[in-house]
Amino acid sequence: MITRNKLTIGAVLAGLALSGSGLTAVALAQNATAPAAPAQQTQQAEPHRHHADHIEGRIAFLHTELKITPEQQAQWDRVAAAMRANDQDMHKAFETMRANRGTTPPNAVQRLEFRAEFNTLRTQSDQRFLEAFKPLYASLSDSQKQSADELFAQHHDHHFHRG
């Protein structure tokens, strides 16, 4: 049975990944050159690898949908770096939360503290993404801006207007 906390965390993570803020990506080169891990370590690393694949997929999707030109690539690289940094910060926060989780459910104060910490992290992530995205957006053609506007409107509608 899936608990409400797991559903909430899953929804938050999905929203962060769609907005450019999400779980962290480990450098793919590190994964490719890492020595083979025992089965238990591989199983534990699997969710992290999934999230790395997800954020890289999201970066590739946005790059394609926005039709980034070679002239815009340097600005795009800053956006992708912000997405990866946000992903890494969020991953660390959730790993810390999991490590600090006791056998008893958190009380009301602990839940509020986590919510406040998470909101602060989310605001920092949004600001990092915005600072990277603004120069890119300014360089986009009118049709690229229209695509960006639609992508972000769909994201907003999907995450904030659910019934």
Image: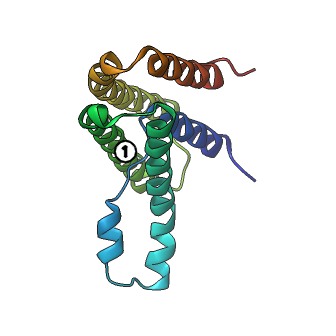
Image colouring: rainbow
The residue shown at (32%, 34%) is: 79
Residue 81 left/right relative to 22: left
Give, as a three-letter code, the residue at label 1.
Answer: Ala
Towards the viewer: 55 or 140: 140
Instruction: Give residue 138's quadrant in the image.
Output: top left
For image coordinates 40% across by 82% down, the residue present is 37
Percent position of residue 105, x then y: 56, 46
- In the displayed structure, would residue 28 be above or below residue 115? below
Where does residue 120 sit, x and y in percent of width and height? Answer: 34, 26
Q: Residue at x 28, y 39 (%)?
A: 77
Position of residue 141 in the picture relative to residue 103 (left or right)? left
Q: Nearer the viewer, residue 77 or 43?
A: 77
Identify the residue at horizontal 71%, vertical 50% (top origin): 2
Say if 114 sits above or below 152 in the image: below
Q: Provide the residue designation for mark 1.
A: 93
Q: Looking at the image, which is closer to me, 50 or 99?
A: 50
How crowded pointer 1 is (Cα within 10 Å; few <14, some 14-19, many 20+) is rated as: some
Residue 152, position in %: x, y?
A: 52, 22
Q: Is residue 118 visible?
A: yes
Q: Helix, strand, or loop for circle 1?
A: helix
Locate the C terminus by quadrant.
top right
What is the total number of numbered labels drawn onto the structure image? 1
Residue 102 visible in the displayed image: no
Query: x, y percentage for residue 129?
Result: 33, 28
